[in-house]
Amino acid sequence: MTVVPASHFQHRHLLGIEGLSPPEITLLLDHAEACVEQNRRVDKKQSLLRGLTQINLFFEDSTRTRTSFELAGKRLGADVINMSVSTSAVKKGETLIDTAMTLNAMRPDVLVVRHGASGAVQLLAQKVDCAVINAGDGAHEHPTQALLDALTIRRRLGRLGGLVVAICGDILHSRVARSNICLLNAMGAQVRLIAPPTLIPSFVERLGVEVHHDMRSGLKDADIVMMLRLQLERMQGAFVPSTREYFHFYGLDYDKLSVAKPDALIMHPGPMNRGIEIDSEVADDIHRSVIREQVEMGVAVRMAVLEILTGRLRNDRGGE
Amino acid sequence: MSGPRQAIVGARLLDPASGLDAVGALLIEDGRIADFGPRLFADGVPSGIEVHDAAGLALAPGLIDMHAFLGEPGREHKETLVTAGEAAAAGGVTTIVATPNTDPVIDDVALVEFVQRRADETCPVRVRQMAALTRGLKGQEMTEIGLLRAAGAIAFTDGDRAVAEARLMRRVLAYASAFDATLVQVPEEPSLARDGVMNEGEMSMRLGLSGIPAMAETIMVERDLRLVELTGGRLHFSHVSTAAAVAALGAARARGLRVSAGAAPHSFALNETAIGEYRTYCKVNPPLRAEADRLALVAGIADGTIDVISSGHRPQDQESKRLPFAQASFGIIGLQTMLPLALELHHNGSVPLLRLLACMTSRPAELLGLDAGRLLVGRPADLVLIDLDRPWIISEREFRSKTKNSPFDGRPVQGRVIRTLVGGQIAYDRKRDG
């Protein structure tokens, strides 16, 4: 494996997977790999980001992603502050840009941002001087999720290229799906989408994916089965008739899984709706489900992203 | 009252309705066109007449913009009759047709009279007010079309939204035909367009934004064409944006239906890719469409399927645009950029010059029954002098509108308004503008 030096990562922010080159993705994954080892030691703390301030700015509720970013920052020695915006100024009518400018004035080094509107993180990134990491914007991108999924797969199967990855569920509203499609395509995997037609975005085939409306055809010989979360409010007649019908046709159980490769891995970005998109037994299958491993990889990937994006800052600081 | 007599000499006279395109002179007396033609003043201008040398410039009827939001009453922080009028004059527009989606909505005789009076007092160009088609734009009960028409409402529209209910639309079309009132509809099926913020396509899919499918327009156009056929009413689609709508209109024309349609300059000057990375200045309704749609609009203008070019002028302040794309307001200002953007189609050879000017002069005048839009003896001297070939760069700094929400800042264009006359009076003069 050729290791690309971190200085080859040319982006100030991580706003999406789209726009990253395969060597850049590989670079991030390689760095994350090293972080996994670090995180398994008793003493997990490093001082790489000592003196740097990381603000986690979440306009949407999130426990796991925020915690994961918080741990990542703390393990690298950064000062981490969480801002949940439901309790702050936005409720008082302050705009996203005002919030960005205010935070910017406090001179953070990294802003980790989640927002319910597609493009909101880009907009914010234009207004601040620090590095911005997209922790999910609307139905657009969630790049660290795609990276942690890729790392999980790569560690288990040793590669990404040539694998058949089936992504199942609410593709339409999913930023996870978009980022994963971009990353897997870039790395040479073959992506299939499986969902009822109402949950597949129009023109998605332009991304170079296969679209299936039937689990059996979509899962056939798949190496990876990636389940997406289905928001319960979308299940009551607007997009699909009922949870019962959805689980019957699109919920992952051993029966449907039987057409995939015998050792196919099962993934889910969490939080799961057991019995709706995934059968509990499948989710807990210790041989095939890597759902908990994904969570572990999440911290490592976020550490790698923080490390690489702050590289320039740390270089400027001068040989510490 | 006898105004001064003025002669404009050496100009290229352009009258789209008659096909006149010749160098000549035009005489203004008492604010009206007293005479014009290639031979007028061939032997010199008699003394006592003020002479304006317009050599090298085109002289055309002042433009009529059939669809603009002017802010008054209720949205004065976005636009006023004064600022809109100044922008219009600088853009060669001498008559603005105002939409009724103000606050309050113009759905009552007293309101039509009020706005008309304010416009006459304050606005440097002519304003003709449209009234709402349904009370409060709610799409439930029709307004007093006959009384509103008598009070001066020039046409009827629900502004940005279409009348959703087919039964009501049928009745309104039928009822309005008794008053020969023109109805204006933005053809968009609301339930298909709901939550949409840009054209539905590969671009919206990649950006993770909800799309407004082209079909939302096609379905409403097709529905309304059937209702026009059924009722014998008259309908103008204020802005079409899709190839399918242009095709449907072409077929309806062939069946002899009394329908007409407009297109906005941004719809044929840009396509959806202008949105790039969530540029909210490109968020507009109807949305910027695919390149094939844009080309169909240009072809529709060239062959007359599209009658009118209107700005769709929609001022929005910074606060409503400096937001994530889905939350930002729809709208582009257009009064001042309509002419140079339309002239791109002349300069690139897509549409003949007179045909293009007809879309902004004689055709809207015919559709609305306005005493404007032509070079005719006795008509008000609403005129525009244009340096057709002059290259320049659109600059936000020159915008007279209260807001600057235009994606065209920095765009190189060709063709500049030199002077605008309303009733023979100078409403805009480039030299004075500096």
Image: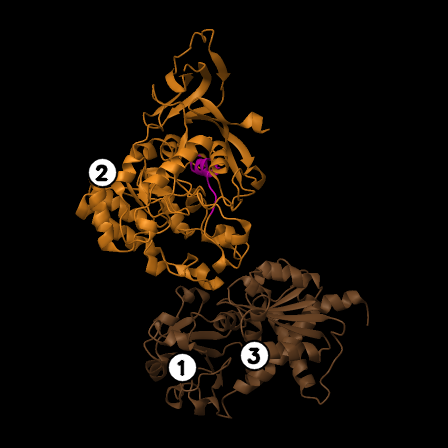
Chain colours: A brown, B orange
Question: Which residue is disc 1 drawn over?
Answer: A219
Residue B20: give x, y in percent of width and height: 35, 23
Residue B301, placed above or below residue B434: below
The quarter of the image holding the N terminus of chain A is bottom right
Label placed on residue B179: 2
- Residue at point 51% right, 69% down? A182
Q: Which residues are magenta?
A: B332-346
Q: Is residue A238 magenta?
A: no
Residue density around tag 3, few if under 14, some if 14–19, many if 20 or more, within 10 Å: few
Residue B166: give x, y in percent of width and height: 24, 54
Can you tell which of label 3 and label 1 is closer to the viewer?
3
Residue A116, placed above or below residue B227: below
On the picture, is B94 further left or further right than A122?
A: left
* Residue furthest to the right: A319
Question: Which residue is disc 3 drawn over?
Answer: A63
The image quarter containing residue B434 is: top right
Residue B217: give x, y in percent of width and height: 33, 53
* Residue furthest to the front: B110
On the picture, is A56 further left or further right than A279?
A: right
User: Does the rendering let one see residue B351?
Assistant: no
On the picture, is A136 further left or further right than A313?
A: left
